[in-house]
Image: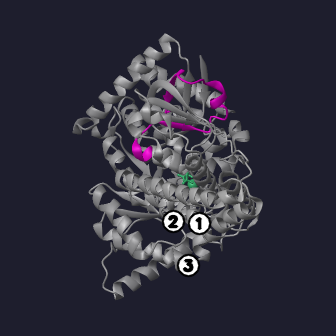
Amino acid sequence: MIKRKGIVASGGVGIGKTYLIREDDLFVPKKSIAYSEISREIYRFEEALIKTRRQISNIQEKISKEIGFDHGRIFEAHFLVLEDRVLIEDVIKQIKNNRVNVEYAFSQSIKKYIDTLLKLNDEYLRERVVDIKDIARRVIKAMLKEKSAKLMSLKEKRVIVAHGLTPSQAADIPKEKVIAFITDVGGRTSHTAIIARSLGIPAVVGLKDITKNVKEADNVIVDGFSGTVIVKPTKKTLDNYKKKIDRYSKEIKAAKKPKIGKAVTKDGRQIDVSANIELPEELGLVKKYGADGVGLYRTEYIFLGKRDLPSEEQQYKAYLNVARKSKPAPVIIRTIDIGGDKFLSRSDVPQEMSPFLGWRAIRFCLARPAIFKVQIRAILRASAEENVKMMFPMISGIEELLQAKKIVASCKKELKKEKKKFDENIKIGAMIEVPSAALTADILAKECDFFSIGTNDLIQYSLAVDRANEKVAYLYEPGHPAVLRLVKNIVADAHKANIWVGMCGEMSAEPTLAFFLLGLGLDEFSMPPPQVLKIKELIQRVKFSDAKAAAEKAVNFSTAKEVEKYLKSKLRKVLDKDFFNFLNV
Ligand code: PEP
Ligand code: MG
């Protein structure tokens, strides 16, 4: 039995046999051709381009239909490569001048193409290299007349194992054949993770070397809740997980009954447990898992990888759709968090030495008020539905919050003049994810209606650990006493100022820490949809007074390990054995 821990990309538990997708580049033979064969090679090239074009269009159509138009647009870059005159002419020139076969000529041209893109100071074009490699593989396959995925002919569903998956590979895989995805590389924000989440397929990424630890058709368990992958499990582990799946499906059914709906502690404290979404298509999951609303809508996903920024109208439609579909539940729309590891496709966004510390989120928006205003107007217009709140990411001090609010006020004025409807009293919140904001929460609280603690960033900034770097991942500890103390300070300052405080970082979905956060008095928890049920049930099964006593003690430990051990022992005491085991803490 081999157990590996990776990054949770999509919740759920999957058990089954593996199917390995190999990354190896296709072998491209070099052959000399005769003068008389030139036209035949050029014809084969044209044929392969047409075939690949058709293939991509089919995938695009399928993905747009199944999970939405925005996902389908991921493939626009593929078409640009297939139509690139410079590339096409270079291949033809090589066939004619060097008298080589078309596969070889094409692979050489693609290499040159990629090298040139990598040298350019353009984030969008550099990001497209993955797509170009994908498209090149397809064109070469078409020319070599290689059979497409064997996966199609499989009789049973499998767990897909790959070093990394491009969005087109992920989309290409027939979903009725997939139990789960596991990969060596990738983060929660990769397109593949988004697609897996949207399809509701369990996925664990960033497992580093999982492809080296499994063979074709090995039995594996993929726990998309905890990010654990178990290869060749023992019978006991397998039985435990089968029970977990059973229980989980029962929970989903039960969650539809209103009496299970609310998260109320045994001694009567009610908490909102909401969900985080990236794209409107994920709203189905918010309902399915019984969340009380959308606690974080990461709007930057409608901006990523596009050549043009979405217009006010396009944004308005997207936000309105989310607001309407969620009604009467609340939706917190976060203004764009561009930068860090998420980039716009425009060349005016420079490359930075430390992007997470650089021109990101509110900093970018305040420096580009024209872009920011378009989004704020769109959010305000959607707020006419009366269940919309707005929040700003990466606030580091009061000036930024005041500047952003000033822009909101000027947009409101404009809309009023234009006689466009919006919610006059829209609630405005600040994400608290920078230590300077956590330590001045009392000052910020006077200027906003709520806080949402972004621990994914708060942890990286307070512990100085890049959240996307696997090498320092062992230092990324949500239970670190420094993090607990910062969070305690934020909650206390919010309550002193009479505003509510939630948490949309992944920390709120860790059962032991959720117990701690409940005890601190956190008012709202927001997490990936599949985690909602478990946390709701946890809250229903404990007393607020027990959590409060545990939280008071937990902040005094010296290390994250001591904190975790203590909270776990408390949970074991207050929960029944079955549920405690189900939590897998
Ligand atoms: C966070 O930082 O905790 C957060 C929720 O925002 P994101 O993960 O999008 O940075
Ligand atoms: Mg953040």
- Across and down, in percent, residue 22 comes to 61, 36
Q: Is 393 one of the magenta-colored residues?
A: no
Give the mark nearer the N terminus: 1 vs 3.
1
Could you tell me if residue 165 is visible in this image?
yes
Q: Is 220 one of the magenta-colored residues?
A: yes
Report the magenta residues as a range: 197-226
Going by the image, does 141 lie left or right of 412? right
Above or below, comparing residue 396 to residue 103 in the picture: below
Give the mark nearer the N terminus: 2 vs 3.
2
Q: Is mark 2 within 8 Å of ligand 1?
A: no
Residues at discs 2 and 1 in contact (Cβ within 8 Å): yes
User: Which residue has dot 1 on it?
Assistant: 344
Label disc, if present, on residue 11 of the rendered structure: none
Label disc, if present, on residue 369 of the rendered structure: 3
Q: Which residue is rendered at x = 26% and y = 32% of the image?
A: 254
User: Which residue has dot 2 on it?
Assistant: 303
Mark 3 belongs to which amino acid?
A: Pro
Q: Which residue is rendered at x = 45% and y = 79% of the image?
A: 409
- Across and down, in percent, residue 300 comes to 51, 62
Q: Which residue is rendered at x = 52% and y = 50% of the image?
A: 167
